[in-house]
Amino acid sequence: MQTILCRIVCWCSVVGLISAVHAAEITPIASLGLGVSGNGAIVVGAAEGVGGDAGYILVSRWTSVGGVQTLGRGSAYDISQDGTTLVGERQVGDASRPFRWTAEQGFTDLGILSGGNGFANAIDVSSNGDVVVGLASQATGFRGFRWTPQSGMTALGDLPGGFDYSQANSISADGQITVGVSTGSSGDRAVRWIGANTTPLDMGLPPGLTGFTEAKGVSGNGEVIVGVWGDGIFTNEAFRWTLLGGYELLDDLPGGLLDSVATQTNFDGSVIVGTGNPGDAVPDEAFYWTESTGMRSLREVLLDAGADLSAWRTLDTPTSLSDDGRVIVGTGTLIDGTVAGFRVCISVPEPTGLALLLVGSILAFSKYRPGNLAQRENCRRQSRFVDSVQLSPLL
């Protein structure tokens, strides 16, 4: 579908039948974007408290209609794909405690592991909100955990021979594939846990390399895992991993050191975001990867689509993206040095005139259906402006 539209757009551009790319709207925001719902409509994260909450960080939930809603002290790290359930951490006395939030039940404390010092945080949640994963302390170290309403909090195992440590970073939509890192006799390794089985599966290293690996994210369908390989000295490189293909290293942004990390991927693993290094003495910045384009600076992608990034010094860390990969949220730095959140909405440029008739005709007589057009309209409905690229305020 995308290939057909691309060919139509390219041909029509030559004969002047396509309208210019719409400008993008970019506005600084006060709350950090850390997680996004599957359709890209709801963003969660952390906002700076005011009034009686001054000096505290507040759990935030944003929609295009209601703006930012703060729910209490703490930080939300992610939201279920259906948008109903938030997870994160709240300060309880001197301890950090994991929570699960829904509109019906409010905050639910997920508890702690036996023998722990009270530290725990919830990092990711399944599509329907019923499975939560994260990190918690226990008597002999730190372990990843898996929580369900039926079983409560269960410690995830670690690899033998190393420190007593594992961490769960991401979970698939159905709650069956959890990924993260564990320390074994050979160092840190990316690992998978399957279902409720607490035994980690070592994902090893890219062929011929030494060092460490860590899984940062898993696709919604559970088939693609992303993260970072490093030599433990100077080099870090983002990876994409599949059960059949194993490791695929993704290189880095051109001109810089080899210092890239893949932070998350979309439902089918076709879009990957993370951070890369664009050059010596330049801070790492957000990247956007697809199989057809390879790794590109997110800034470049937005500028090519007509975005105005004059208010932004850098787009630093993308933390989450929608199922279709068109909505990306994360944190950046404004020109004045203020750290702010961002929501990027990338939609397909819209043909006009005869080009629109051509698109409709080809769609009508082909086996393809306009699913991507529906995605574009969804992207627009959730934004304040009808633009090909939208970096929206969470206000």
Image (cartoon, rainbow, N blue to C red):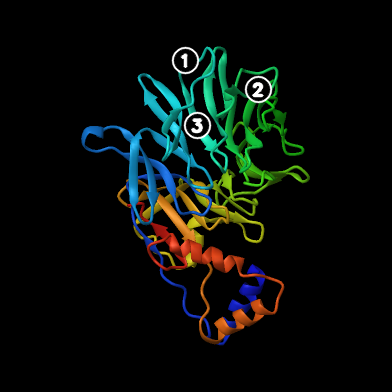
The residue at 36%/56% (across/down) is: 65
Going from N to C along the chain, the mark reached first, 2 or 1, is 1
- Identify the residue at the far front of this view: 104
Quadrant of the rendering where the N terminus is positioned: bottom right
Q: Residue at x 62, y 78 (%)?
A: 8
Asked if residue 4 can be seen in this view, the reply is: yes
- Residue 122 is labelled as 3
**Sequence-first disc among 3 and 2:** 3
Amino acid bearing label 2: Asp
Left or right of 139 in this view: 270 = right
Tell which of 294 and 54 is nearer to you.
Answer: 54
Amino acid type, callout 1: Asn
Q: Secondary structure at mark 3?
A: strand
Q: Nearer the viewer, residue 119 or 338?
A: 119
Q: Is disc 3 surrounded by few (<14), some (14 to 19) or many (20+) residues within 10 Å?
A: many
CA gap between label 1 and label 3 equals 16 Å
- Asked if residue 21 is positioned above or below residue 105 in the image, the reply reads below
What number is the disc on residue 158?
2
Q: Secondary structure at mark 1?
A: loop
Disc 1 designates what residue?
Answer: 117
- Label 2 SS: loop
Q: Is residue 42 above or below residue 185?
A: below
Q: Amino acid at mark 3?
A: Ala
* Residue depth check, mark 3 versus mark 2: number of the one nearer the observer: 3
Taking the spot 33% from the left edge, 45% from the top edge, the residue there is 69
In the picture, residue 262 is in which quadrant? top right
Q: CA distance from mark 3 to mark 2?
A: 18 Å
Residue 377 lies, with reference to residue 153, above or below; the image says below
Examine the rendered structure and indicate whether residue 108 appears above or below residue 94: below
